[in-house]
Amino acid sequence: MTSPTNTAKTQHVTITINGKPVEADVEPRLLLVHFIREVAGLTGTHIGCDTTSCGACTVLVDGTPAKSCTLLAVQADGAAIATVEGLEQGGELHPVQEGFFQEHGLQCGFCTPGMMMTATALLARNPDPSEAEIRRAISGNLCRCTGYVNIVKSIQYAAKKINAAETAPVAAAVGAEVRQA
Ligand code: FES
Ligand code: FES
């Protein structure tokens, strides 16, 4: 007689996480957050509630923030996932990471990876958000430590840094034209 554990069917999935494909045979009930943490070994994505309430598990799925405790790994088959580990590039902190560092946007840090991913998606679609827009964007991410004030400042810092980086080449080009005139 087959034991119940042997009857569980698995499904082969390939999920690209931070640009690298991760393949595995998984049970259909496996949550995406467990795939990220236990199969891919990326434990920066936290689990705070498992009930879609806290946002600690937020990752980007094809660029859109999603609570990875709410999705099954099989639903993310073929998707591109971004986690907090993918923010840093070439040893350089992402502006959002730098903002949280500079503006003291964290205390215990448990909510921080999810906050950062939500902030990253916000700034990608709205590089100059108002305070109200920032607060609306992070309304699905709970922080029990900071009171949110420094988190908002951190995201505003990142927005300024991103905008300065985008306008710098333009300013340089304008300067070059002026000098040539
Ligand atoms: S662990 Fe996913 S929303 Fe809390
Ligand atoms: S820094 Fe502790 S929960 Fe946000």
Image (cartoon, rainbow, N blue to C red):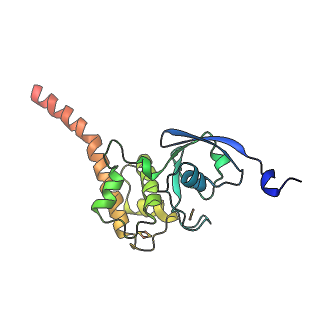
Ligand 2, by image quadrant, is bottom left
- Residue 108 in the image: state x and y as whole percent: 40, 70
Left or right side of 45 for 155: left
- Residue at x 48%, y 39% (from the top left corner): 19
Against 90, is 128 above or below? below
Q: Residue furthest top?
A: 180
- Residue 105 in the image: state x and y as whole percent: 35, 65
Image quarter (top left, top right, bottom left or bottom right) of the N terminus: bottom right
Residue toward you, 63 or 46: 46
Left or right side of 9 for 71: left
- Residue 144 in the image: state x and y as whole percent: 45, 74
- Image mark count: 0
Residue toward you, 164 or 40: 40
**Residue 66 visible, this orientation:** no
- Image quarter of residue 33: bottom right
- Residue 47 in the image: state x and y as whole percent: 54, 63
Q: Residue furthest right?
A: 1
Image quarter (top left, top right, bottom left or bottom right) of the C terminus: top left
- Residue at x 81%, y 51% (from the top left corner): 7
Against 50, is 32 above or below? above
Against 78, is 96 above or below? below
- Residue at x 24%, y 36% (from the top left corner): 169
**Residue 109 visible, this orientation:** yes
